[in-house]
């Protein structure tokens, strides 16, 4: 079911065929982030608008949008008959293909996105610190340093929830790309939108409009061990279930 050498060859072929596409995707993301940074700071004239909170919003919003697009593009070859047959008939098991998909989409891309974000974010943060220091002689109450995910201990559980939530949406996009044979992009987008319109109001009702209650271990809201166990099961089990579904649908596509 799993052969390390065969899996290595599969990964090498994947990089040889789509490595340039991955790099172009990250390069376009860097360009979009740079343009957004120039708009927010008005071409660098108002660096006080570049606080850590603003950087955090840019990071997570950019990650959520680009991660779903990247996940959807992973199986675009299945829309072409010849390319789909070539990809599905490669000498690798469905488990190996699913594992490679998980490593590329849910592991490698977040790391690459974080690195790409810092490439264009660190110069802006340095300029913001310099502008703030030049304008004020006393210590500013605002946080002007570069934003690093999971650096703030108080927000790690919320950020982990964002990562798991995005991983769930990524798996939903992949399932849609595998399940729908025609107009897969459009049908997947509609399905994810409808699901969010159903789930988000329900979560709001369950949490009494308090987002902190949805994250296990969040220091602000004290809850019992039973609630913590249920939340951890929800946050880990839900994306795990959908990723297992990716494997099932990928195997069905190979058999059909």
Image: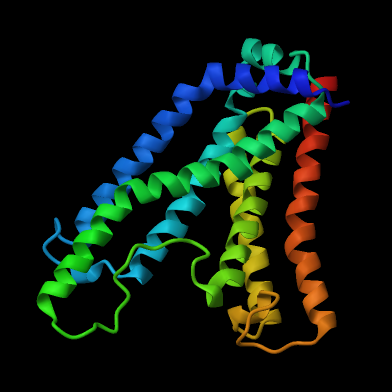
Q: Position of residue 103 (x, y in %)?
A: 66, 38
> Which residue is nearer to you in this view: 179 or 171?
171
Residue 256 in view: no
* Residue that sits furthest to the right in the current view: 1
Image point (11%, 73%), residue name: 134
Q: Position of residue 180 (x, y in %)?
A: 69, 33
**In which quadrant of the rendered view does residue 32 lie?**
top left
Circle count: 0
- Left or right: residue 115 versus residue 174 is left
Q: Position of residue 155 (x, y in %)?
A: 54, 73
Image point (37%, 42%), residue name: 29
User: Does 204 appear above or below 239?
Assistant: below
**In which quadrant of the rendered view does residue 154 lie?**
bottom right
**In which quadrant of the rendered view does residue 232 lie?**
bottom right
* Residue that sits furthest to the bottom in the current view: 222
User: Does 166 appear above or below 154?
Assistant: above
**Colour style of the rendered protein structure:** rainbow
User: Does 193 appear above or below 87?
Assistant: below
Image point (59%, 48%), residue name: 190
Image point (60%, 83%), residue name: 209
Q: Position of residue 35 (x, y in %)?
A: 24, 48
> Which residue is nearer to you in this view: 62 or 197?
62
Residue 136 in view: yes
> Which residue is nearer to you in this view: 98 or 207?
98
User: Does 224 appear above or below 110?
Assistant: below
- Left or right: residue 193 versus residue 181 is left
- Left or right: residue 250 versus residue 200 is right
């Amino acid at each position: 079911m799993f052969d390390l050498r065969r899996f290595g060859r599969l990964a090498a072929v994947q990089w040889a065929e789509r490595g340039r596409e991955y790099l172009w995707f990250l390069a376009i993301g860097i360009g979009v982030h740079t343009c957004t940074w120039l708009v927010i700071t008005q071409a660098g004239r108002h660096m006080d608008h570049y606080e850590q909170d603003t950087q955090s919003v840019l990071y997570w919003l950019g990650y959520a949008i680009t991660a779903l697009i990247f996940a959807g593009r992973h199986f675009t070859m299945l829309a072409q008959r010849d390319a789909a047959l070539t990809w599905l008939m490669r000498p690798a098991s469905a488990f190996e293909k699913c594992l490679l998909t998980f490593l590329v989409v849910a592991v490698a891309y977040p790391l690459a996105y974080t690195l790409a974000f810092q490439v264009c974010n660190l110069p802006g943060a340095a300029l913001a610190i310099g502008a703030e220091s030049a304008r004020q002689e006393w210590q500013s109450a605002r946080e002007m340093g570069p934003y690093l995910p999971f650096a703030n201990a108080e927000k790690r559980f919320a950020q982990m929830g964002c990562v798991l939530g995005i991983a769930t949406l990524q798996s939903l996009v992949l399932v849609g790309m595998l399940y729908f044979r025609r107009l897969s992009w459009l049908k997947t987008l509609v399905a994810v939108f409808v699901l969010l319109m159903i789930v988000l109001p329900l979560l709001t009702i369950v949490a009494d409009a308090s987002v902190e209650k949805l994250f296990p271990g969040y220091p602000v809201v004290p809850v019992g061990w039973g609630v913590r166990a249920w939340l951890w099961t929800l946050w880990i089990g839900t994306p795990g279930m959908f990723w297992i579904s990716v494997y099932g649908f990928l195997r069905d596509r190979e058999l059909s």
